[in-house]
Amino acid sequence: MKIKSIRRANNLAGKIVFLRADLNVPIKNRTVLDDYKIVMILPTIRFLLRHNCRLIIATHLSDSRASTKPVAKRLAQLLDKKVRLVNGCVGDKVEKAVKKMAAKDILLLENLRLEPGEVKNNNKLAKSLAALANLYVNDAFASSHRNHASVSAIKKYLSSFAGLLLEKEILNLEKVLRPKQPLISIIGGAKIETKIVLLNSLAKKSHRVLIGGALANNFIAAHGFKIGESLVDKASLRAAASLIKRHKNIILPVDVLVAGDFKSNQVQVRAVNQVQQKDIILDIGPKTVNLFAHFIRQANTIVWNGPMGYFENIHFKHGTLSVARLVAARSTGQAFGAVGGGETVEALDMTKMGHYIDWVSTGGGAMLAFLGGEEMPGLRGLVK
């Protein structure tokens, strides 16, 4: 795999660089709650500053009305350097701000989602963004599965390179695609339709695919077992049945934790063939944890995306946190461990063992798309 890294750029000194980052971080009361994505972009920023570049940084926020002002504040704190926020993404104000920039200045644009053309991959917007700079750097792996103007169309108008974080993401996730066997894949979460391609891809490479979370409900139901009032995507039951038929290495829970509702503290352990009509499956059971542990301890490569249950509730976090500890304990030396997805990383943080994981991806959907072999518009022209 070849990556057109910013390290390979010629005559970088003094250039105006449009740096597309994914700084879509949780914000509450105008304060950044988790700065992991911001911290991960720092090596690219520092690399460009060492070459006396002027940096225009652009990101989106999920809330299309939210401002990037808290992001600018936290970035400035981490860099111990002024980060100027401009009120807009394109237009006269932005152009004037760029003209005033000196070497090593940093300008953060407003939320790209304020521009309707962003999600439409609008060429006019892309051309306007490109006109601000001399070259383009994509360091937004977490957004590279989207066909948006600032990650896709913009590359038509500027010489383009991959940032250092994007490069690391590709090199580390490539180790999952070309694993040292046995590869153990652990997939949880809720929506099966977003993971069908991934499951097909990983099942072909994996020694075992361990399924948990609400995702497992679809497979349990496809086997003909009752799942009570548990979350299930009825439209995807046929897909689950097909996956089970094609891939004999898919491992499902053998027991589960159930309750009458999501807030209940009345928890019972049931075998998967003994779930009652009014039960809601909210976690994997202790026998399943032991079963999953057996396979995780055999792994030389591990990939994990998606919680094993409703871990936000203290009564249903045991399965997810057990898997997190098992993956962390096996990673860094014994096996190569890669983890991704917002909820997965959140659960990992709860164990205080995240530093043992070889690679914690900044991408959730992007990680799924890359490992599933889906098209990645943001990588086109940058990764072969």
Image (cartoon, rainbow, N blue to C red):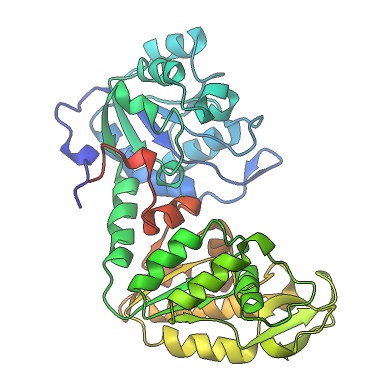
Is 21 on the left-hand or right-hand side of 3? right
Q: Is residue 132 above or below residue 174?
A: above
Q: x and y percent of residue 335 in the render? A: 33, 78
Q: x and y percent of residue 342 in the render? A: 55, 57
Front residue (pair 276, 378) = 276
Q: x and y percent of residue 319 in the render? A: 62, 80
Q: Is residue 33 above or below residue 102?
A: below
Front residue (pair 242, 205) = 242
Can you see residue 188? no
For the point 66% across and 81% down, the residue is: 224
Q: x and y percent of residue 79 in the render? A: 42, 39
Can you see residue 242? yes
The image quarter in which residue 263 lies: bottom right
Front residue (pair 325, 290) = 290
* Residue that sits furthest to the left in the current view: 10
For the point 54% across and 42% down, the residue is: 24
Is 258 on the left-hand or right-hand side of 244? right
The image quarter in which residue 264 lies: bottom right
The image quarter in which residue 105 lies: top left
What is the tally of numbered marks visible in this picture?
0
For the point 44% across and 48% down, the residue is: 39
Front residue (pair 238, 369) = 238
